[in-house]
Amino acid sequence: MKVSREQFLENRERILEVASRMFRENGFNGVGVADIMNGAGMTHGGFYRHFASKEDLAVKTSEASMTHTVEKWSQQRQSNPDSALSTFIGHYLSERHRDSPGEGCMLAALASDAGREGPEIRKCFADGVTSMIGSLEKLLPGEASADTRRTAIAMMAELAGAVVLSRAVGDAALSKEILGAVTEDLQPVCSGA
């Protein structure tokens, strides 16, 4: 049965959404194409009508997720410029974000996986991280400068690292302590101190 162009695009979007969530929950190598297609309510055979390979899908989901993240940060900055940075930090370092990797930041969920993948995934992550750092720079108080960029890079590393570590430890109290320590550490940046 021939599928309309509109239905084809809807199916592709559904595959991207399911794959993005599953990759963030299980890692790039922790989920197969059949699982993704089943989760999207489609057959495995239809996958190659949409994507050249699983790596192609991983690149597309990573690009879309990181672009979405940057767009959300930009919207926060535009709608609430005075508190956008502290709101962002509070959300990023929340227990909800820690406990919901399938809904959270692609970087915090898959950066260590990306480092073991091929050049296309690593380039995608490099582009995404660069864009995220640029967006974070705009959230920082003061004029853009080399110091602002350095602060944004350090902050991005600290934020993502805190979420990674808080997810990795098997101790709830230590996990909460990691998130709290980094939140407290970043507060002076929010106030421009």
Image: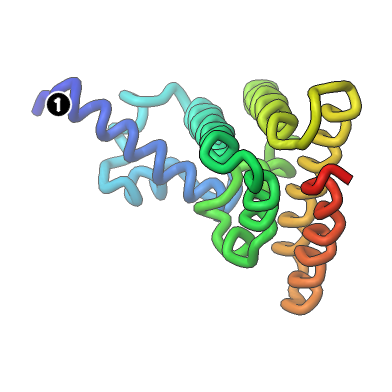
The residue most toward the front is 82
Residue 58 visible, this angle? no
Q: What colouring style does the render use? A: rainbow
Q: Position of residue 151 (x, y in %)?
A: 86, 36
Residue 112 visible, this angle? yes
Whether residue 114 sits left or right of residue 55 in the image: it is: right
170, above or below 55, in the image: below
Looking at the rendered structure, the kind of residue marked 1 is Val
Residue 144's quadrant in the figure? top right
Q: Residue at x 41, y 49 (%)?
A: 35
187, above or below 136, in the image: below
Q: Residue at x 9, y 28 (%)?
A: 1
116, above or below 171, in the image: above
Q: Position of residue 180 (x, y in %)?
A: 78, 66
Whether residue 6 sits left or right of residue 86 in the image: it is: left
Q: Position of residue 105 (x, y in %)?
A: 60, 46
Mark 1 closeness class: few <14, some 14–19, many ≥20 residues within 10 Å? few
- Tell which of 170 and 79 is nearer to you: 79
Q: Residue at x 50, y 52 (%)?
A: 103
How many discs appear? 1
149, above or below 98, in the image: above
Q: Dot 1 corresponds to which residue? A: 3
- Tell which of 78 and 51 is nearer to you: 78
Q: Position of residue 124 (x, y in %)?
A: 63, 25
Residue 42's quadrant in the figure? top left
Q: Residue at x 85, y 22 (%)?
A: 145
Dot 1: what SS? loop
Whether residue 188 sits left or right of residue 78 in the image: it is: right
